[in-house]
Image: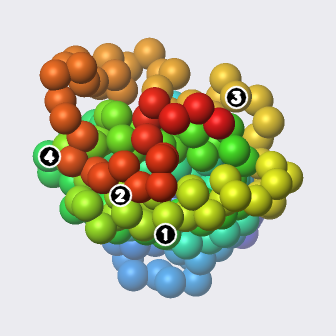
Amino acid sequence: TFGHITIEAVVSTQSTGVYKFAISIFCEPLKERCLSKIDEARIDALISDPTVADYGLIKNITLLGNTSEIKIFDLVCRWYELDTKERQENTSQLLKNIKFERMSHTDCKKVTDWVFGVASNEIDDSTCMKIAKAVHKRLKEPDTDLSITNDSNPSTSNPSSSNSSSSKPSSSSSRTPRCPKVWGVSSSHTF
């Protein structure tokens, strides 16, 4: 403790800044404590300002498994859209960590819309195929809530609903998606 302020209080309110500090001083216990404080509200804050997140933080969040997968997907999308060329390879790795089988059918539709629309020319084919297979498998199952803390409010779960102009492709109608249409899953497919 520092006076009347405990490390726990600082970590719970400033986890992103403390996380970066923990990384800079190679303090694994403090880094783990920060990651344990990542919850839906912190992910929402990172979605609204993904500039404070780096690849390492987002990678750790994708591996946690204690938050809504659609929110994690939204975070990856927003972070990627800040610098598509530089983050292309890392985004493919991050997308592979997301558990699409935990998403609702509606969330799966959002995923396919983004992958086969916004990011169709940037995300590698093997990642597109993995996502298509996972989404297809999920859509064959009943639409029950398989997530840990799935957000049922669609207005907060859509990576394309931000005010950022980068979230909407400027020439999507002239682009041909590279990702194959697998098992009828495409951005035009309705669920």
Three-letter amino acid code at disc 1? Asn
How packed mark 1 is, by other alpha carbons closer than 10 Å (few <14, some 14-19, many 20 or more), is some
Question: Helix or strand or loop: what does disc 3 sit on?
Answer: helix
Marks 1 and 3, how far apart at CA: 22 Å
Residue 138 locus on image (x, y percent)? 66, 59
Residue position for label 2 = 128
Closest to the observer: 169 or 179? 179
Is the C-beta separation of discs 1 and 4 under 8 Å? no
Q: Earlier in the sequence, mark 4 or mark 3?
A: 4
Q: Earlier in the sequence, mark 2 or mark 3?
A: 2
Is the C-beta separation of discs 2 and 3 under 8 Å? no
Residue 2 locus on image (x, y percent)? 67, 64
Question: Helix or strand or loop: what does disc 4 sit on?
Answer: helix
**Residue at the spot 60% in from the left edge and 46% down from the top edge:** 108
Identify whether 184 is placed above or below 56: above
Q: Earlier in the sequence, mark 1 or mark 3?
A: 1
Image depth: mark 4 or mark 2 in front: 2
**Residue at the spot 50% in from the left edge and 84% down from the top edge:** 28
Residue sitting farthest toward the right = 144
Q: Earlier in the sequence, mark 1 or mark 4?
A: 4
Residue 100 locus on image (x, y percent)? 59, 60
Residue position for label 1 = 97
Three-letter amino acid code at disc 4? Lys
Residue position for label 3 = 154
Marks 2 and 1, how far apart at CA: 13 Å
